[in-house]
Image: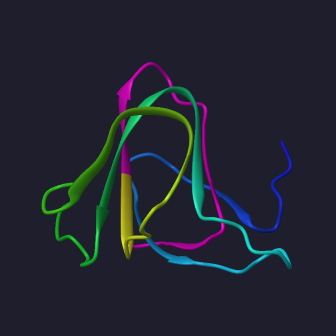
Amino acid sequence: MALKPYQTELQLNTIYAVAASGEGGEQILPNIEVIGGAVTIYGSQDLPANAPTGMIEDQTSFSGIDFFAVVPNYIYIEQDSGTTTSIIVSGLSVTEVE
């Protein structure tokens, strides 16, 4: 599947620095789409030393599409059940933290 310029595919068990983005020439509300399986989404304003420890559990057993009411500075996603085939965020600038 070809992603649009304002979409980014994320990997499980990876810390990402995130910020709202105006990519795509139109205002895109920051959102996440999880296809297949269910995940737990963690967010944090500060970089965690050992994710997900120290992060706030934002969504549990999440699957489908939802909007971010507040965009955290950092996000971490782990598998809850099933097999997730795709995690895509839109309207966010995303950088993997190494």
Q: How many marks?
A: 0
In which quadrant of the rendered view does residue 85 lie? top right
Residue at left offset 41%, top offset 73%: 97
Q: Where is residue 17 shown, x and y percent of the image?
A: 43, 74
In which quadrant of the rendered view does residue 6 lie? bottom right
Residue at left offset 36%, top offset 70%: 74
In which quadrant of the rendered view does residue 54 lie? bottom left
78 shown above or below 4: above
The quadrant the C terminus occupies is: bottom left
**In the image, residue 91 lies in the stretch drawn in magenta:** yes
Residue at left offset 21%, top offset 58%: 56
Q: How is the image coloured?
A: rainbow
80 shown above or below 95: above
Q: Which residues are magenta?
A: 77-98
18 and 91: which is toward the camera: 91
Res. 36 visible in picture:
yes
